[in-house]
Image: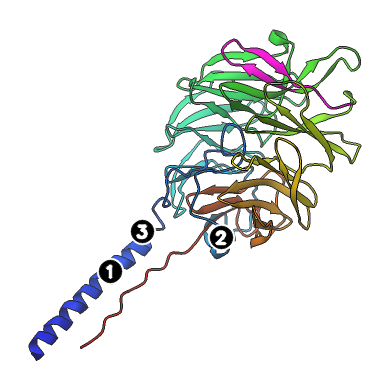
Amino acid sequence: MHHNRRLRYLVMCGLLFSFLGFALLWTHTTRGQAGPNLSADWPHFGYDAAFTADNTVESTLNVTNVAKLERWWGIGCDDGSFSVMSRTPAISHGKLYASGAGRKLTAYDARSGQQLWEFGSGNLGWAPPPVVSQDGTVFYFEDSIPTHLYAVNGETGAKLWEAALAFDLGFNDTSVVTIDEDRHLVYVVEAPFMGGGKLYALDKQTGEVAWSMSKALNNTEFLGDYAMLKDGKIFAAANVPMTGYPDHGQHLLKIDPISQTVELTYKRPQPENYYDIANYTLCNDNLIVTFDYQYDPVKQLVAYNIISSTIAWHKPISQTTGTIACNPAKDQIYVPTNPYLYALNATTGDEAWKYQGLNAIYNPSVANGLVYFLSDTNMYAISEETHQRLFRFPLGYAAYETTQVAIANGMLYFSGNGGTCDLFALNIPHKVLLPQVTRQ
């Protein structure tokens, strides 16, 4: 009997030690694996081709666990240097791609932060964000005046091509490539400081120019940081001729990429010589645009149904302080200002709620019932339903106006603007519960 008890005890000890070894290995390797849902990636600033900034696939983080987030890893932490990582990194298939001032394009394991490879010579005082396509190709701007666009293999860091044409983006660190996966094209808005902007479509496989639109070809000067896509059409900002005074003005355009013609020119708010375009996004069938006038504190938030050039609704608003996010499922937009974040119905403009911050609120993003944004010296998460603050994370320095929180596979990534870290990666720690062993 005692022999059997002793044997049983030794077996249980062996099983326990085996489990402990497995648990330690599991705890160690979870920092090197992709998140629980690999499809919940964040391919670029704004998340999708409509630039909704809403990760509709993310399901790990929610209102009950977001407050448990902790710093998991970071880039440039406590190194004394100052570096802004503009917009967001790109996250795809367990890898994170980032570029920053003074840094090369670098790939990391998105969960552990282990550096995988570097590409290029690096940018100096500017660094537009990388974009990753469905096949894992990373698109990356480098240099200024002129700027070169590269396509890089996301697995190896090897150069696939360099665009046949260099671009005049100046020192703009907010330009974002738009990928047309259906037509295998890459769209670049070239908006030089002195005007004369162009819209280029590049072959996604070769980098050769497939077509372009410009003042010389179409009497249209393009502007803004990116083009948007919906239902096979391009939506882009441009300066176009107008009848009467003034003889030109900034409009959103709906463009057919097959014929390279303008299908719709969306009307401007009155008076037409007053406003310039600040930000724009698509929310279901609604095109949302903010019009700004530098010397007037009252701006205009304007919405169109994409099938009509006329204004569906508009309302005065204080100056927007970043891009607008959209939750298509709720048909709700989130408009950042100083100091409020407004939640509005995208179709009617009716206010659902407003959240009061301490300072300007920058570039909100949305996922699974939460709205994330950077403001003052913190990153915040608030509930979409109750608009109550659920989480605050200190940056160590004032937030930067171009940065946004990327949500991917249960983790958050955002620029620290040279604070404690240049880039923060937050995660919820996973604890292993060991079984109890009762000695008999």
308 on left or right of 328: right
The front one of 361 and 111 is 361
What x and y, as percent, mark residue 56?
53, 43
Residue at the spot 36% in from the left edge and 58% down from the top edge:
29
Which residue is disc 1 drawn over? 21
Contact, mark 3 vs mark 2 (Cβ under 8 Å): no
**At which x and y percent is residue 233?**
60, 21
Alpha-carbon distance for marks 1 and 3? Answer: 12 Å
The answer to whether the residues at label 1 and label 3 have Cβ atoms under 8 Å apart is no
User: 10 Å neighbourhood of mark 2: few (<14), some, or many (≥20)?
Assistant: many
**Quadrant in which residue 254 is drawn:** top right
- Above or below for 328 versus 222: below
Three-letter residue code for mark 1: Gly
Secondary structure, mark 2, is helix
What is the quadrant of the N terminus in the image? bottom left
Label 2, on which residue? 66
Nearer to us of marks 3 and 2 is 2
- The amino acid at mark 3 is Thr
Q: Residue at x 48, y 23 (%)?
A: 182
